[in-house]
Image (cartoon, rainbow, N blue to C red):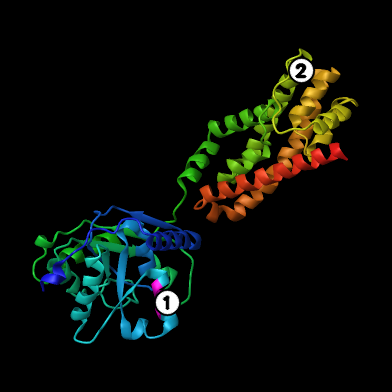
């Protein structure tokens, strides 16, 4: 019995555990949202959870970072009988096989020695089978006995939402999942085979209500900003900066910030336009006075095209809408050509406003469709958007440089 009480130190970071944790966390976010509430001590422990779905184990793996490396034990004569099942289970959840001969508790102890002996945490579903009505079933006492025998804490954990997501005998129905961590129960506080402390915690956690959809913190901050003055002020500032020197187009503000609150995209487009008109007038005035603002990521051929278009007067700014030449170069060309301020402001408002509204409508429509996913994956979305924009900008610059050599 002494060898059974040998518990290892937490394994620390491990690539397989991190990969499973990240994979399942993203899967749950993708199919409906995922939240973890509460915290757990960083040590080997017995994690006891309610059981209503085959999605429960992945939900628990997603809840604990890789250093915890929570592991579930599975019957060798069923789950590990076939090679493909054995490989799939090992890759997906890192399960440890146990023999069921000699009694269920004997097999559980053998599995616990493998898991806890390595410093990992043991996942146990004491109900023994998945519930079909959502109510907590009778809990077997094996988990309490293991916690006492190995002298490790027992942590009750409630899993909410998996029964609706993947019910017993049913198919996948996308929806949110929430994992609620209880308070650790120390082994010295566990009496005989009494499961009542675990039952009380699980029932209290389950009674807190259904799972709620998760959302990105970045999305939440930008959503609130767009609802107030900050979002509109940001749009005006972005439009102004782009017309003076900022190398990122004004519609990127809508794609970066505006998509967090689609219904505010068109008001933001109006403020972008106002800021852009002001920036064009400032750049034009500075250029008239011999003060040319920096124009990064532009080429000589772009400047030549802007000068050619603005030679026809203020209406030349309409050419800018679709040719990839930054508006700041048109503003500078207007200053060089001495175009009057009022006509320049009127045509800039028309050209920039039309572009902002058109792009805003397209971006807003896409944001409405993608809203359920965007609110959960906003940071990855921003990463993909940034890479895509940088690649597109590089192609535009390369195209204009080729015109010079041609």
- Residue lying farthest top? 289
Give how far apart the Cα atoms at labels 1 and 2 are.
Answer: 69 Å
Q: Nearer the viewer, mark 1 or mark 2?
A: 1
Q: Residue at x 22, y 67 (%)?
A: 117
**Residue 29, horizontal then vertical, whole percent:** 47, 58
Mark 1 neighbour density, 10 Å: few (under 14) some (14–19) many (20 or more): few
- How many dots with numbers? 2
In the picture, which quadrant includes the C terminus?
top right
- Residue lying farthest front? 405
Residue 326's place in the image compared with 29, above or below, is above
**Residue 45, horizontal then vertical, whole percent:** 22, 62
Element type at mark 2: helix
**Residue matched to label 1:** 87
Q: Residue at x 79, y 34 (%)?
A: 351
Question: In the rendered structure, which segment of residues is drawn in magenta?
Answer: 86-90
**First of labels 1, 2 by sequence position:** 1
**Residue 314, horizontal then vertical, whole percent:** 85, 25
Residue 374's place in the image compared with 130, above or below, is above
Foreground residue among 23 and 133: 23
Element type at mark 1: helix
**Residue 218, horizontal then vertical, whole percent:** 48, 43
Q: Quadrant of residue 244?
A: top right
Q: Residue at x 13, y 67 (%)?
A: 148
**Residue matched to label 2:** 287
Foreground residue among 378 and 267: 378
Q: Is residue 185 visible?
A: yes
Identify the mark at residue 307; answer none if there is no mark: none
């Amino acid at each position: 019995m002494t060898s059974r009480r040998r518990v290892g130190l937490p394994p620390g970071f491990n690539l397989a555990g991190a990969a499973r944790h990240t994979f399942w966390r993203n899967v749950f976010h993708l199919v409906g949202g995922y939240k973890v509430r509460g915290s757990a001590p960083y040590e080997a422990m017995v994690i006891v959870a309610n059981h209503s779905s085959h999605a429960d184990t992945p939900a628990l793996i997603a809840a604990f970072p890789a250093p915890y490396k929570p592991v579930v034990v599975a019957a060798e004569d069923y789950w590990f009988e076939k090679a493909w099942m054995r490989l799939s289970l090992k890759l997906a959840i890192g399960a440890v096989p146990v023999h069921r001969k000699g009694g269920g508790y004997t097999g559980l102890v053998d599995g616990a020695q493998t898991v806890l002996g390595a410093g990992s945490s043991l996942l146990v579903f004491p109900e023994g089978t998945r519930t079909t009505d959502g109510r907590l079933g009778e809990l077997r006492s094996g988990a309490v006995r293991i916690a006492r025998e190995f002298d490790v804490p027992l942590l009750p954990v409630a899993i909410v939402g998996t029964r609706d997501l993947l019910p017993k005998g049913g198919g996948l129905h996308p929806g949110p999942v929430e994992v609620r961590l209880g308070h650790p129960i120390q082994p010295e506080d566990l009496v005989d085979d009494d499961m009542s402390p675990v039952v009380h915690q699980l029932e209290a956690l389950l009674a807190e209500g259904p799972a709620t959809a998760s959302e990105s913190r970045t999305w939440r901050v930008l959503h609130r900003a767009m609802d107030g003055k900050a979002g509109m002020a940001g749009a005006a500032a972005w439009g102004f900066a782009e017309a003076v020197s900022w190398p990122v187009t004004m519609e990127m503000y809508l794609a970066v910030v505006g998509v967090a609150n689609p219904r505010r995209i068109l008001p933001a487009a109006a403020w972008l336009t106002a800021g852009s008109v002001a920036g064009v007038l400032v750049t034009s005035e500075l250029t008239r006075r011999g003060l040319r603002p920096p124009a990064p990521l532009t080429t000589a051929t772009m400047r030549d095209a802007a000068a050619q278009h603005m030679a026809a007067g203020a209406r030349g700014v309409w050419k800018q809408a679709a040719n990839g030449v930054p508006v700041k170069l048109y503003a500078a060309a207007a200053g060089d050509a001495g175009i009057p301020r009022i006509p320049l402001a009127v045509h800039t408002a028309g050209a920039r406003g039309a572009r902002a509204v058109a792009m805003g409508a397209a971006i807003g429509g896409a944001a409405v469709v993608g809203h359920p996913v965007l609110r959960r994956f906003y940071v990855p979305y921003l990463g993909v958007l940034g890479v895509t924009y940088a690649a597109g900008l590089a192609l535009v610059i390369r195209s204009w440089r080729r015109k010079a050599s041609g």
